[in-house]
Amino acid sequence: MSATTMKPYASGSLDAGPRLQGKGLKTPAKRILGESKAAQNGVVLSPPSSKKRKLNDELPNGGPPSSQNGPNVKLASSQPKSQFETEVLEKLTQDISGLKKANAEKDQQWERPALDDFNETRDSLCFQQIEAEEGTLPGGKVAVKLYGVSESGHSVMLHVTDFLHYLYVAAPVSFTQKDCEPYKIWLDAQLAQNQPVIYSVQMVMRENILGFQGNQKSPYLKITVSDPRYINRVRSTIEGPGGNYRGMWKGVDSGILTFDSIQYVLRFMIDTGVRADLCWQKKILNEADIWNVMGRSSAV
């Protein structure tokens, strides 16, 4: 078996270029030639000098050049104006311009007229009611506020005081008129307030609308409070476990029922016949009843 003669391989870098005597080898710098992304996508870029060139015929606002130059040039319309445009619209424009110059616009008067010689103890008050809400007077007294406008254009805010809130309780069988005052005292003691809360307890005849009762009225206790803010507290005390006065209510293990859980302003509107819509209210102010005007101002 003959052996193959192997030539020794010298490790190192190969250089196809000429050698320089007395100096080391210098590796040539690599140059990477490649196409740009724009050229690859087929987009031809404009030379940089064209970006700096300013067009002489370009408008100042950056818009395209127009064949109609000059500040007073108006676009001509091929369609003539209609009779409505020439007669009605132009006349309205002239009238509005004349009113603005003369300051004679009478339909934009926001200020209410001044109150002259109105006397709350002598004159009657008639106004169109717009809104009603619960409010508080100076001193903490609760009142119903009625807002509206009179026929002469005055803004009206009427405070209705001394309207008392109340609820009903079915009277037990053994309850009589003589028990009203002791029950009132006992109920006030259960509430434990610094001032009397129960204004009165009355025995009245009412009919329960829950189910047909044959048009038969039954005795009920009308419990009136001195302040409507305590009505829920009174209701909870009566319906609670300790609200059975002397055990007079029989068979009410689940609690005594109270009737007409109605908000204060709604109760006032129902009892007085004040409607929720835009209605006219008229009152002679010198009559002594639940209608009272508190104070006076130029916007009565």
Image (tube, grey):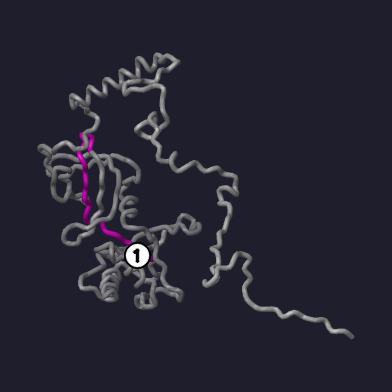
Q: Residue furthest left?
A: 117
Image spot of residue 236 (x, y percent): 36, 71
Q: Nearer the viewer, residue 43 or 275?
A: 43
- The quadrant in which residue 243 appears is bottom left
Q: Magenta part of the protein: which range?
A: 150-169
Q: Nearer the viewer, residue 125 or 3?
A: 3
The structure residue drawn at horizontal position 27% and vertical position 20%, both measured from the top left corner, is 94
Q: Nearer the viewer, residue 104 or 109?
A: 104
Residue 1 horizontal side relative to residue 193, left or right: right
- In which quadrant will I find the N terminus? bottom right
The structure residue drawn at horizontal position 50% and vertical position 58%, both measured from the top left corner, is 211
Q: Secondary structure at mark 1?
A: strand
- The quadrant in which residue 195 appears is bottom left
Q: Nearer the viewer, residue 210 or 241?
A: 241
Image spot of residue 81 (x, y percent): 40, 15
The structure residue drawn at horizontal position 59% and vertical position 47%, both measured from the top left corner, is 41
Location of mark 1 (residue): 221
Question: Does 177 appear in magenta?
Answer: no
Question: Does 168 appear in magenta?
Answer: yes
The number of callouts visible is 1
- The quadrant in which residue 149 appears is top left
Give the crowd class for mark 1: few <14, some 14-19, many >=20 residues within 10 Å.
many
Q: Residue furthest front?
A: 21
Q: Amino acid at mark 1?
A: Leu
Against 32, residue 152 (above or below) is above
Q: Residue furthest bottom?
A: 1
Image spot of residue 47 (x, y percent): 48, 42
Image spot of residue 169 (x, y percent): 37, 65
- In which quadrant will I find the C terminus? top left
